[in-house]
Amino acid sequence: MTAHFARFLALSLMSVTAGKLSGTDRPPLPASGPPHWAFVAPEVAEGGSRSIDELIQPKRTAAGLIPQPAASPSLWLRRVYLDLIGLPPSAEQMQVFKKDAGTDLQGARRRVVDRLLASPQYGERWGRHFMDIWRYADWYGLGSQLRNSQKHLWHWRDWIIQSLNADKGYDRMITEMLAGDEIAPDDPDVLRATGFLARNY
């Protein structure tokens, strides 16, 4: 397969450059040999349970670094709560997780992550970063500049949060922000996305 693809590329290049190169300048067809690296499956290193471990293990070993032990269930829970929703777990949530993790740690972790990703706080936490990048602000400037504020811009803020919670693709979000009034002029949910244009242009 790789040799056929390489031959196809070489022939394509020759047909494109046929009018520009003399016969002696044309690149030779590739001889069959070892397959191109991009078509070879990577070797899986021993001792890694996840792909990131396999990638960093050689450099870590070369630097003489020793991996830290896995985080305790309570520390892991605190980290995942802060990462996904920006708030620490309550004492009650800690107890429920410890009880659940006692019988099935991996299953308990999966359930916590799924629950946090489905919670409204997920969009609120990560929407803040999107709003910073897209220059969201409730108010425009100071003093007399406040009259230039968009009174209903909070609809755009809510659209950002709800889009993240609905797992809407970034490409779709950008399309709706730039052309929501064109692609769905009668849909108020999509029209809210054009608050980006009202705020920045």
Image (cartoon, helix red, strand yellow):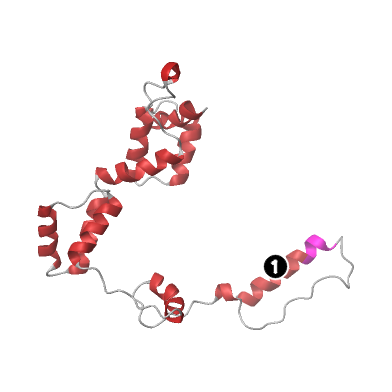
Which residue lies at the image location 35% right of the left edge and 78% below the top edge?
66
- Give the residue at x 24% y 46%: 119
Where residue 180 appears, as percent x and y from the top left, is 46, 32
Vertical placement of residue 192 versus 171, above or below: above
Task: List x then y, in percent, for residue 187.
Answer: 39, 28
**Label 1 element class:** helix
Left or right of 36, for residue 70: left
Q: Is residue 186 above or below residue 64?
A: above
77 lies above or below 163: below
Q: How many marks?
A: 1
x and y percent of residue 57 in the render? 42, 77
Q: Residue furthest front?
A: 143
Which region shows up in magenta?
14-18
Q: Quadrant of residue 34?
A: bottom right
Residue at image x 44%, y 16%?
Answer: 144
Q: Examine the image and state in which quarter residue 189 appears.
A: top left
Is residue 167 left or right of 116 when viewed as pictured?
right
Name which residue lies at 35% across and 47% down: 167
Figure quadrant of residue 138 = top left
- How crowded is the residue under tag 1: few (<14 C-alpha within 10 Å), some, or many (20+)? some
Q: Amino acid at mark 1?
A: Leu
87 shown above or below 161: below
Q: Quadrant of the N terminus?
A: bottom right
Residue underneath mark 1: 9
In the image, is residue 69 part of the stretch drawn in magenta? no
User: Which SS does the magenta portion mostly show?
Assistant: helix
Camera-side residue: 95 or 17? Answer: 95
Question: Quick check: can you spot residue 184?
Answer: no
Of 57 and 3, nearer the camera is: 57
